[in-house]
Image (spheres, rainbow, N blue to C red):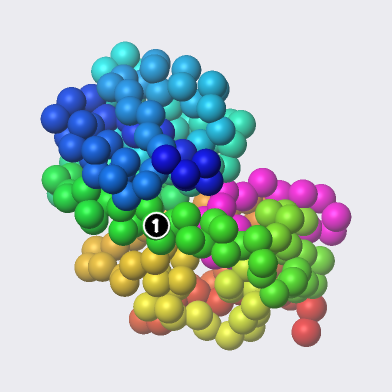
Amino acid sequence: MASDAKKILLVEDEKAIRDAVAAYLEREGYWVVGVGDGQSAIEEFEKHQFDLVVLDLMLPKIPGERVCRTIRDTSDVPIIMLTAKGEIEDRIIGLELGADDYVPKPCTPRELVARMRAILRRTSANDNSSGPVQVGKLSIDLSQRRVTYDGQPIAFTGTELALIEMLARHAGEPVAKADIYPRILGRPLGRYDRAIDVHISSIRHKLAEFARDDILIESVRGVGYQLVARGAA
Ligand code: CA
């Protein structure tokens, strides 16, 4: 194992799936800690510095929702939720709790790794971004992982941060969802896919608290979203 191997916490109670995914990830060069319940997930998370968490929603002892919330209390580590097939509600719940993306089960280890790579690539790409962006009193600095409004820091997850930065760079113009998905989640926009909508809703919530309606993210019907700053132009 290379010392710069990405560390993955894999939380999945079905042992056959966990073992298959862990073996695949290890072959791909990741360093993996696999656990089968929510309690162990939280304990392991506190012990190591993970680069990404793969989290099943339905877990014994402590459910995935609570594990996700507990991790989010202290960390913006990327989280990919594993959700039961067809359970659209589950996917949205996971995202609302701060997961970055979801993968419906059953999935092949290959699909999961593709999704992980996309998120990890974006996380490390943030380190050499093209400098901070300023819209009105809103300031976003990807390399510092920092968003402020009028000097006050607003806590965003990695995905929210990348998303608001993309919109802020195009402030006043619509950004198509078809462009947002590949850039932010590393995948094309799927049918009935609400991942970005849920992230937007969370960003709006956080913005409203600080910026009231000075900074708005407007829906552009049939296209996507646009960030609008009142009185900033
Ligand atoms: Ca499960």
Q: Residue at x 73, y 55 (%)?
A: 144
Q: Residue at x 18, y 25 (%)?
A: 15
Q: Position of residue 161 (x, y in %)?
A: 60, 58
Q: Is residue 19 left or right of residue 77?
A: left
Tell me if residue 196 comes above or below residue 220 in the rendering.
above
Q: Amino acid at mark 1?
A: Arg
**Quadrant of the rendered image containing residue 207:** bottom right
Is residue 100 inside the magenta stretch? no
**Quadrant of the rendered image containing residue 160:** bottom right
Is residue 154 inside the magenta stretch? yes
Q: Residue at x 33, y 28 (%)?
A: 34
Quarter that holds the N terminus: top left
**Quadrant of the rendered image containing residue 195:** bottom left
Q: Position of residue 28 (x, y in %)?
A: 32, 50
Tell me if residue 76 comes above or below residue 175 in the rendering.
above
Magenta part of the chain: 149-164
Q: Position of residue 225 (x, y in %)?
A: 50, 74
- Looking at this view, is 10 or 229 the one in front? 10
Q: Is residue 56 left or right of residue 161?
A: left
Q: Which residue is mark 1?
A: 117
Q: Which secondary structure lies at badge 1?
A: helix
Tell me if residue 72 comes above or below residue 200 in the rendering.
above
Number of residues whose C-alpha sits closer than 10 Å to that of mark 1, classed few (under 14), some (14–19) or many (20 or more)? some
Quarter that holds the C terminus: bottom right
Q: Residue at x 27, y 18 (%)?
A: 60
